Amino acid sequence: MFDASRIGVVEEDWSGLRTALNSLDPGEAGLRDYLAQNPNFVRHARGLAKITDVNPALQKMAGASSSSVFFENVDRLLGEDDRSFLGALVAFAAGEPFYEGETELVRLDGRRVPVLFTITFPSEPDGNRTVLTFVVDITERKQSQDALLAAQAELAHAARVATLGELSASIAHEVNQPLAAIVTSGEAGLRWLRRDVPDLNEVAATIGHVVTEGRRASEIVTRIRTFLKKTHTQQDMLQISEIIDEAAPWSGGSSQRTTSP
């Protein structure tokens, strides 16, 4: 069954690793934090997990032509940035029956293969010598997920472009508001300057309004451009009081006309 399985299986001896873990004193930080702060020990521990047997399915997955080739290159199979082994050490030290996760297997030709794995820890006293790891190649599943995400992005982009025509009037309205405010503030500033005694405080206030509305118009254009791009949706914090303050000057006139007798 070990050799005939289509799932990659490797048998390991973790007795040396158990000895190394028992010699540690992580203190109050806990084992996980200690290992995270001591990556050299984790790399050393990976070498203490001695592989005793490997089935043909895992040899093929790793691109090894034989078990001897697999053993010679076993240190290359997990990348330097792999974090899955740290979690396995914590589970092993805690007496968990198994540990499972997802990582990448680095083939001998350098290609990375996404895999799911389960490491089983036997409960027998001598179980440290028969730790089994089951590995499943999930390349096709990853490719399907990537294709699905790409298709969803294409559909979302097409939907946004299709609705652009319907949004044209709304866009024009949004942009015209700050532009109208800029013109109004600019004309008011000119009037304050043309007085016999220019009111510089009022001029400064109107210029501030021009700058604010100019930035608002720029933000509107930026949001429209982002809306049409193939980008992920972003969420921003909004202050409802600021929105009300912005809307009040534009709705005040119409509200007064509506409520007046």
Image: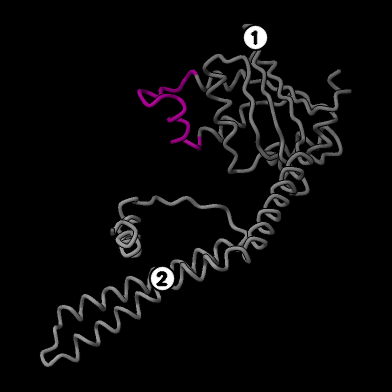
The image's mark for residue 177 is 2
* Mark 1, secondary structure of its residue: loop
Q: Residue at x 70, y 56 (%)?
A: 154
Please say if 224 is above or below 97. Answer: below
* Bounds of the magenta segment: 22-40
Front-lying residue, 242 or 37: 242
Q: Indicate the quadrant containing the C terminus: top left, top right, bottom left or bottom right.
A: bottom left
| x 39%, y 50%: residue | 237
**Residue 38 place in picture, x, y as percent:** 46, 35
Give the numbered dot on residue 126: 1
Q: Quadrant of residue 52?
A: top right
Residue 1's spot in the image, x, y percent?
86, 18
Name the residue nearer the viewer: 112 or 219: 219
Name the outermost residue toward the right: 4
Dominant secondary structure, magenta: helix
Name the amino acid, label 2. Gln
Query: How many numbered circles are shown?
Result: 2
Compared with residue 12, is residue 143 higher up or lower down, i.e. above or below?
below
Q: How is the image coloured?
A: one colour
Q: Name the spot of residue 127 as percent of width and height, x first.
A: 65, 11
